[in-house]
Amino acid sequence: SVEYPIASAYATAIGEGDPVKLLSTGYIALAGVTDRPLGVFVGCQYQASDGSNVFSNYWPASTVGSNIKAMIVADPMVTFEVMSGGTPTFADVGQLADHVAGTPSSVTGNSTAYLSSTTGTGTAQFRVLGLVDKPGNTGIYAVLEVQFQEHEFLQTVGATPGV
C-alpha cells in the first residue's frame, strides 16, 4: 500500500475496502460513482487530538488529528473481490460497472460499498474479471473479481478509459 494524507476533520467516514479519489489538494477522499479512483482504502494512522497514536482500518468522519496518513492500494493492475448488487452471470465477464458507496461499519471498519449492475462496454470504474470460485457464490450479492477500468494513474484527465 501507499500512504496518502487525509485532511484533519474530513467529514466523511471511510472504511476498509472503500474506493478513494485523489483531490487537487493532494489529500484523498471517498470516491463517488463519477470519480476516477486512486485506489482502495485499507486503513489509516494518525495522532488524535488527545495525543494518542491511532492505527485503524476505519476513518471516523470529522476526526481531528495530525500527521494523518491513509494506506491505499493504488496499483492500477491489482484485482479485488467485491460484492455485486445485482445477479451476475458468466456473461458479465469483461463487462464494466461502477461502485455504489455506502456508509462503512463503525464497529468492524469494513466498507459497505458494492458493485452496481454491469453497464456493458461504456465507461465505468471497474471491469469484471469473473465470479469468485467458491461454494454458493451465485445469485444476488455474488462476489466478483474486478480490476480498475478507470484509475488515477491509467489515464490523463478527460481521456477515454483504457486508452
Image (cartoon, rainbow, N blue to C red):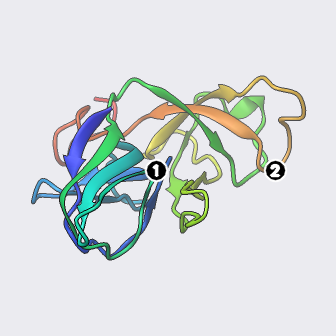
- Disc number placed over residue 57 in the picture, else none: 1
- Picture coordinates of residue 159, whole percent (x, y): 22, 41
- Disc number placed over residue 140 in the picture, else none: 2
View extreme (right): residue:
136
Residue 36 visible in the picture: yes
Nearer to me, 6 or 68 = 68
Q: Compute the Cα span from label 1 to label 2.
A: 27 Å
Check whether the beta carbons of the residues at disc 1 and disc 2 lie within 8 A of each other.
Answer: no
- Give neighbour class at mark 2: few <14, some 14-19, many 20+ (Cα, 10 Å): few
Q: Is residue 8 left or right of residue 113?
A: left
Task: Please identify the quarter of the rendering in which residue 51 is found.
Answer: bottom left
Type of amino acid at the residue the image marks with label 2 = Ile
Type of amino acid at the residue the image marks with label 1 = Asn
Q: Residue at x 18, y 56 (%)?
A: 27
- Please tell me whether mark 1 sits on a helix, a strand or a loop: loop
- Picture coordinates of residue 22, whole percent (x, y): 22, 52
